[in-house]
Image (cartoon, rainbow, N blue to C red):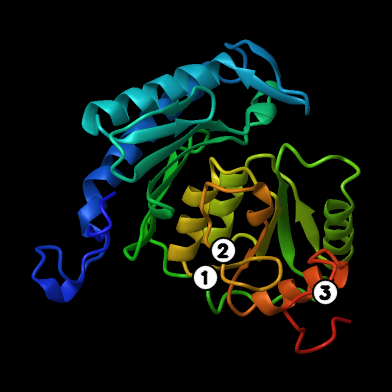
Amino acid sequence: MSPNRNPFPDPSAGDPSAGDPSAGFASECRTAVAAAEEAGALLRSRFPDDFAARPKGEHGDVVTDLDLMAERLVVDRIRERFPHDRILAEESGELRGDGGGRTWLVDPLDGSNNVVIGLPAYVVGIALCVDEASVVGVVHDPVTGRTWSALRGGGAHGPRGRLAGVAGGRPLSSAGPLLAWTQGHAVGRDDPTARALRHTLENRSRRLLQLWAPLLTWAMLARGDIDGFVGYRAEAIDLPAGALLAREAGVAVRHLDGREFGGGFTGPDTERSFVAGRPEVLPHLLELVAMSGAVGYGGPSYVPRRSVP
């Protein structure tokens, strides 16, 4: 992208989309929604029996022919509408663009391991990033037929319209928050940080869910179904869409040490560990992370304001 081009125009500059920072990407969002729903229909028509699967990598992951078919469909739809954009797809990798700074991220079947065992918990995810900033995020659930979408600065929307925001939701249960957990594929079973985090979260929460479909979890967080979401060295392909959807619904997202979380898709996975939750719950979640000792050798930069019982 040219350094002189601002992807988020100043509303005072006379732009026709003045006052609506999301309007410049409305067409991209419509394309992503249509592609995700078309891919979802394909997945739904073949689940739970009509597909083949094989191992992927050395960490117990799998890939199915549904992943490949859905990805091809989504990539083709994006290419038809935006032929010069760069695309990063989960299975096929990079399709180069003209260097304009626009990158689409495509996770055609988030939850492949669930599909293989017949568990109906999987989604299609698509994001558009301008440089490192996510501007469009779409999550489609083929099982229920529901779609959630977000535009940077334009809010998050679901089947019933705009998500009204999760702030001021239900109070925390006396048994602790309802949390979800994800970790990247490269995290080993004996990783001490992951073990410390999970142990603390499991002991201090009402439930700790691990759905193996992070985008589905982000949608649950954006809807207010769960209180928080903690990720350790998360995968890059689905993070921008999920984090944008949650943020635009009013969720706060931070690094484990409390710093503001960028949610980019480049760089090392050590920069993709996060804590996300309703704003009034976030301090409590950061306290739990601090208790685990997982933030670093020098101790967490976040200092708890009160002790956790």
Where does residue 293 sit, x and y in percent of width and height? 86, 68
Where does residue 26 sit, x and y in percent of width and height? 24, 51
- Is 101 placed above or below 97 here? below
Three-letter residue code for mark 2: Gly
From the image, tell me which residue sits under label 1.
166
Three-letter residue code for mark 3: Gly
**Res 153 quadrant in image:** bottom left
**Res 215 quadrant in image:** top right
Answer few, some or many: residues within 10 Å of disc 3's Cα (few below 14, many 20 plus, some between 14 and 19): few
Answer few, some or many: residues within 10 Å of disc 1's Cα (few below 14, many 20 plus, some between 14 and 19): many
Q: Nearer the viewer, mark 2 or mark 3?
A: 3
Q: Nearer the viewer, mark 1 or mark 3?
A: 3
Q: Are marks 2 and 3 in contact (CB under 8 Å)?
A: no
- Element at badge 1? loop
Mark seen at residue 299: 3
**Res 21 quadrant in image:** bottom left
- Is 283 placed above or below 131 here? below
